[in-house]
Amino acid sequence: MHHFALNHLLYRFIRSPRAKVALGLLFFYIASQVFWIAKLRQWKRRLLTRRSLRRWLGVAGWLLYVGFYVYDFWTFRHTPSPTRLTLGTALFQGPFQWWLFGSSLGFAIYLVVLAVGAVCRLAVRVIQREPSPAASADAPVDPPSPSGPSRRQFVKQTATALGAIPFAAGAYGALYGRLDLKVTHPRIVLPHLPQSFEGFTILQLSDLHIGPFMTAREIQKVAEVSNRLRPDLMVLTGDFVTWDASTQYAVVDALSGLKAPFGVWGCLGNHEIYTHTQRSITRLFAKVGFRILRYENALVQNQSGAINLIGVDFEQFSHGGWGGAGHVRRYLPGVDKLMMPDRANILLSHNPNTFDRAAQLGIDLTISGHTHGGQINLELAGIEISPAWLYTKYVRGWFRKGKSHLYVNRGIGTIVVPVRIGAPPEITVYHLSRIAG
């Protein structure tokens, strides 16, 4: 019976759409590795004339390649020092993730260029074979010029050259792009803002993702920059950790020096769900004087007015009824009871997809993160391509629906690969006003 049930579950998984996508991605990845390894062997033969040198270089290359896999998969479950950059991580994990990024994206570009070249060749052949309407019926027709090997070779060389661009872009994004911290100053007009809060500033940090490539020391530096900006209030919008629950202590300690006259507030992200740290990290922040709002509201008051601050956990919409951690049947359940109609309502929500519901409820400003601004954004022929478009229309920056505003912060850390291209890390300082212009 147990054997039958196991076979049944395996059969259902193989037939499921997720399994097909996973198998497709695995096949694509294997093909990309075979392609680039073959290219490296070709270049090695052209550049090195001595056979013995080629052989030793090939052996060294294979040992390094296998070593990358062994180290990366071992550290995935046994990270030796997840809050600081170790020598092993710098020499093996970083280059390996750079290779995965460059080889996968480069192979995809190579295939796209080949496909475009094939379509163009087919179009040329069709045009050449089409008789001209003005031509006489008995006029001789020139045979179409063959698409010779030189043309096909040119397309392949062009595709390979373009496919190599992600390797250079990945190196730039890892060594410079992910550390190129920017401070943005959006001005947000809130009609319900009390007169005494005119010019009030809120500083936002999001998606810190503490780890080997966003260390505790780097987060402390971000905190120091934040304090120098002297905002009235600070908010932290989730994803403090990545995959390791033990890093919550280090990230809270690194942020503990944040100071603002009206306090430091926050909400939780999806990685707090993945690591089962929602309750524990909330308690840790409370010990250093920061308050995480979990479907709660709090009045931020001065002598003659107040604004209503609301915080929710990460919410992912579920079309079905299967629920699960982080899933809801409707965004922002119960938030209407936390609102104050006659005050400015500001929502801290890690997921920007909650904005449509927030606008329906009449929330004045939603402050979000989650997307990393796309993290890796490419621009082709004037069209920006971002992986974040796969799950949200709110990738980064300011959006508006009626009188409701949304701002999506690009975050500080990275996920999957320690690379940022076209989406530098961001500290956001909101300048609140009652008056437009």
Image (cartoon, rainbow, N blue to C red):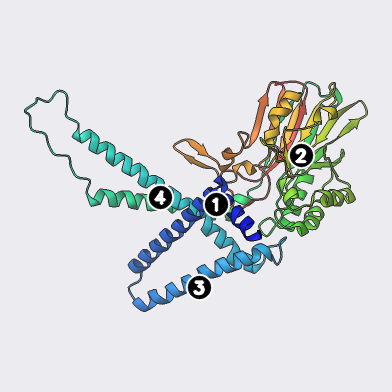
Task: Name the element at disc 1.
Answer: helix
Q: CA distance from mark 1 to mark 3?
A: 34 Å
Which residue is labeled 1 in the image?
A: 14
Residue 200 x/y as whole percent = 81, 31
Q: CA distance from mark 3 to mark 4?
A: 27 Å
Which residue is labeled 2 in the image?
A: 203
Residue 333 x/y as whole percent = 78, 32
Residue at image position (79%, 38%) is 312
Looking at the image, residue 148 lies above or below residue 340 = below
Q: CA distance from mark 4 to mark 2?
A: 42 Å
Kindly identify the amino acid type of the residue bearing the numbered disc 4: Tyr
Task: Name the element at disc 2.
Answer: strand
Residue at image position (70%, 35%) is 185
Kindly identify the amino acid type of the residue bearing the numbered disc 2: Leu
Residue 63: mark? 3
Task: Name the element at disc 3.
Answer: helix
Residue 108 x/y as whole percent = 45, 49
